[in-house]
Image (cartoon, grey):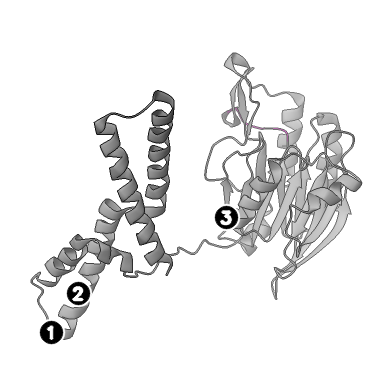
Amino acid sequence: MKLILWNCRGAGKPSFAPAFRRLVHVHNPDICVLFETRLAGRSIVKARRALPRSWGFYAVDAQGLSGGIFVTWKLDGGKLDIFNVSSQEVIMVISEGVGRPWIFAAVYASTDFRARRSLWEEASKLVDQGQPMLIAGDFNCIDDPQEKMGGRPFSYQRKVREFQEFISTNGLIDLGFTGPRFTWYNNQQGPARVWERLDRAFATAGWIQEFPDYHVKHLPRIASDHSPILVCTDRPIPYHCPFRFERLWLCYPRSWGVVSEVWNMPVRGDAMYRVSRRLELARRHLRRWNRVEVGNIFRRIEELEEAIANLQLREASGGGLSQAELSELRSFLSMHNALLSQQEIFWR
C-alpha cells in the first residue's frame, strides 16, 4: 500500500490541482491525506473536482483561513474506516485482504505547542491499545538539531522536550526517509532562511513487524512550502523495460552496421548458444547506440522548435538573417521534418 501525506498550503489555489494530479499519476497512491487545505463548507465541493472522482472522500473543515484536512482513498485498494476526527488528526483503521487491521493516524499538529499536548495525549491512548499503528504527517516540531538549518540556533525548549517524551514514552520508531533532508522551507532570504524536517512518519514495533519492507520518501517541494511524503508498506519492485527493436532505427543507416558488427563477433559454443549470445550483444549495442546517437526524439523536436522560433524571431525583429543563419535555419527545418517522420513511425 502507498500513502501520500502533503501539507498543500491551500487546496483552492490554482497551482494545487495540477500538482496533486501529477502526484497521483506518478506515484499511484492508495490513500492521500492533504493538510492545511484552508477550505470549508461549499468551497470543499469545488476542490473535490481535483481529486479522483471514483475515490472515497472525507473532509475536515478549516477554521478560518487555517487548517483543514482532506482524506481520499481508492475504494478497491482495501477497506478504510474513519473512527475519530479532530482539527489535528484523522484516525483510520486500514484492512487489507486477510492481513491484520492496523491504525493510521494522519497528523496535522497545531503550531501552538500547548494545543499539541491534546494531540500527544490522544495518540498515546491509541498506542496503548496495542494495535499496529502508523503515525504520519506534519508534526510542526523537530526533536534534533540535525533536523534544522538556518535561522535561530536549535534549543531544547519545552515544546521539543514534550515531543521527545511523546516519542520515547510510546516506543515510537522514526521510519527514516530517502530524498531531500528537509521537508519545509520558509521561503525567506538571507539569515532568515530556515529549513526543517517537520513532516515525517513514526510507527510502533508491531506495525514494523507487519510491514518490514516499508520505506519513506521525501518528494520534491512543488506548489507548497512543504514536501509531500510517500510511505510504502511494500518493497518496491524494480521494473525493467523490455527490449524492442524500434522501426524508426531503420531510418539511420548506422543501425544496420551495429547489427552487422555484433553478428560478426567471434562467439564460442554450440549453434543455439551462439545465436542467443549474439542476440544479447545486439540488444546491448543497439541500446547504447540509441542512447548516444538517436536520443529522445520527442525532446529533440522540442529543442529544434525552440531554436527555429528564436531564429525566426530574430529574422522578424532584425529585418533578416545572415547567410550562415539562413543556412542554419534550413538545416533545423530539415532535421525537424525528419524527426516528425520518425515520430510518425514510432507511434504507428
What amino acid does circle 1 point to?
Asp
* Mark pair 3, 1: CA separation: 46 Å
Residue ID for mark 1? 270
Real-space Cα separation, disc 1 to disc 2, in angstroms: 11 Å
Q: Range of the magenta residues?
A: 140-145
* Residue 26, numbered circle: 3
Who is closer to the viewer here, 31 or 112? 31
Residue 143 lies within the magenta run: yes
- The one of 114 and 303 positioned closer to us in this rendering: 303
Label 3: state its secondary structure: helix
Toward which corner of the image does residue 342 lie, by quadrant? bottom left
* Residue 148 in picture, x, y percent from top left: 60, 27
Q: Against 328, is 250 above or below? A: below
Residue at 43% across, 66% down: 347
Q: Secondary structure at mark 2?
A: helix
Q: Residue at x 89, y 34 (%)?
A: 64
Residue 277 marker? 2
Q: Marks 1 and 2: CB-CB under 8 Å?
A: no
Q: Closer to the N terminus: mark 3 or mark 1?
A: 3
Residue 129 visible in the current orientation: no
Taking the image as shown, residue 245 lies to the left or right of residue 170, namely left
Q: Considering the numbered disc 1 on the image, is that residue within a helix, a strand or a loop?
A: loop
Image quadrant in which the N terminus is located: bottom right
First of labels 1, 2 by sequence position: 1
Q: Earlier in the sequence, mark 3 or mark 2?
A: 3
Q: Quadrant of residue 249?
A: bottom left
